Image (tube, rainbow, N blue to C red):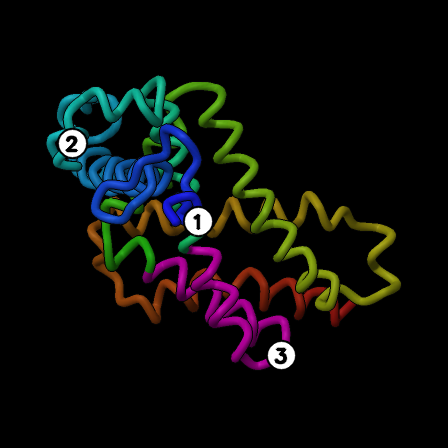
Amino acid sequence: MDGLISDTSPPNKRRYGGVLPEERQRQRRAKLIDGAIEVFGTKGFHAATVREVCVAAHLTERYFYESFKTLPQLFIAVYAHLREELMAKTLAVMATAEKTPIGLLEPAIRVFLEFIRDDQRRGRIMLVDSLGIDSEVAAFSGATARDYSELLKLHLGRMVPANELAELSLDLLAEGMIGMNVLLAARWMQDGFADPIDKVVRTNLLPYQGLMSLLDKR
């Protein structure tokens, strides 16, 4: 009868408390990301140490090196986590928004501004520190901006009359508009979010509305 009893877990895959090693490692990695958001978002990346991140994550340093080789590598994981969270919020709000270019842009911009205002650690990580760590982090940040510019390009294509499209680079226009929105958000953050968010949303939307008005008159 003993031969009929089998353990489906492979060798060296012993469960502790019913949890496989891979899942425990995933949980520790998530704790390190949460700890890094606290440390990077309050002290800044350049003032942070591996030890401080591990203390915030309630883990020993050996578990840091189980998942990451360097702090910049951890920073990229943190940035990716925040990016995915923001993109999910953006797509969710756009799914129920008015299906017009401005109707879709307004809630998307508002979600971004709320994202950095409601947890100011996010703004420091995504808008400040990501620009001054190393070329790999800068490239990752740039790729994120391009993801959003691709999303924006779809809406700009609906704003610009068909006969004007051949004379414009939607790629450059989208990246320029995203850059403007990021700079306005960074300035709002540096000013301590003093202006009401409705005012900042309207300010961000004005260039898009102006673009539509200008093109309509041509």
**Which numbered disc, 1 or 3, marks the residue that appears first in the sequence?**
1
- Quick check: can you spot residue 127? no
Q: CA distance from mark 1 to mark 3?
A: 60 Å
Q: Nearer the viewer, residue 213 or 53?
A: 53
The numbered disc on residue 59 is 2
Q: How busy is the neighbourhood of tag 1: few (under 14 within 10 Å), some, or many (20 plus)?
A: few
In the image, residue 208 above or below residue 51: below
Label 3 sits on what residue type? Lys
* Residue plotted at (29% across, 20% down): 65
Residue 155 lies, in percent from the top left, at 66, 64
* Residue plotted at (26% across, 57% down): 117
Q: Nearer the viewer, residue 5 or 24?
A: 5
User: What is the tally of numbered marks visible in this picture?
Assistant: 3
Q: CA distance from mark 1 to mark 2?
A: 40 Å
Say which element carries label 2: loop
Q: How busy is the neighbourhood of tag 2: few (under 14 within 10 Å), some, or many (20 plus)?
A: some
Q: Main secondary structure of the magenta part?
A: helix
Q: Which residue is mark 3?
A: 99
